[in-house]
Amino acid sequence: MAGKTATRGAPMFKVRRSRVHGQGVFALRRIRKGTRIVEYLGDRVSHREADQRYEDRDERDNHTFLFIVDARTVIDAGVGGNDARFINHSCDPNCQTVIEERRVFIEALRTIQPGEELHYDYQLGRSRDDPPDVDEIYACRCGQASCRGTMLWPPKKKGVRRAATGARGDKRSRGTPAGAAHAPQRKRAAKPVR
Ligand SMILES: [Zn+2]
């Protein structure tokens, strides 16, 4: 791991306004493919606690700083989070998330040039009680040719999907494996189930 993380004194990225969505994170220098860029930090809480924190949130507010670690744990970057929370979504991302020992890291999926915005696929989940226009609420404006128009993961249907960025023979949990059941993903603040 050493040597692949940020070199001290030479920051790899900075946060500034993005044309895609609010703030974004931009490369300050060339970041080579496979580089571990930053850890996704924040308060580690249960899904229930995360849901309770944001239960009064407007259903039409598409902001989320939650990241699913596993069935037990969510990282809430709204509390004690770092710059990783500002990395925007893209349907054709240059980064991916990797979960290792229940920690979440953002790594370069390809070599990134200085000035490029960093992004990964949020793969936000769907739920049965979503409003009909949920794709509009979570509309994606990444501008990529392969943009699916939404930050939400496609509805489960057609069996095997194309593995957009995953399936590279790595044992670690990768960004977008075909199965996607336990893919690293951001979490939408949901109404707690009662
Ligand atoms: Zn898109």
Image: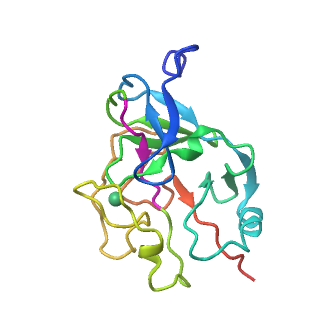
Q: Nearer the viewer, residue 110 or 86?
A: 86
Q: Quadrant of residue 9?
A: top right
Q: Which of 158 and 148 is in front in this view?
A: 148
> In the figure, 37 relative to 6: above or below?
below
Using residue 77 as the reference point, say whether residue 123 is left or right of it. Answer: left
At a point 49% along the width and 29% down the height, the residue shown is 13
Res 110 visible: yes
Q: Position of residue 164 (x, y in %)?
A: 30, 52
Q: Where is residue 4 in the image (x, y as percent from the top left)?
A: 48, 20
Q: Residue 74 colored magenta? A: no
Q: Where is residue 99 in the image (x, y as percent from the top left)?
A: 55, 42
Quarter of the render that holds ligand 1: bottom left
At a point 54% along the width and 77% down the height, the residue shown is 127
Using residue 43 as the reference point, say whether residue 101 is left or right of it. Answer: left
> In the figure, 67 relative to 137: above or below?
above
At a point 41% along the width and 68% down the height, the residue shown is 139
Q: What segment is highlighted magenta in the picture?
A: 115-123
At a point 47% along the width and 49% down the height, the residue shown is 88
Q: Position of residue 76 (x, y in %)?
A: 69, 52
Using residue 101 as the reference point, say whether residue 88 is left or right of it. Answer: left
Q: Quadrant of the C terminus?
A: bottom right
Q: Residue 121 colored magenta? A: yes
Res 172 visible: no
Circle count: 0
What secondary structure predominates along the stretch shown in magenta? loop
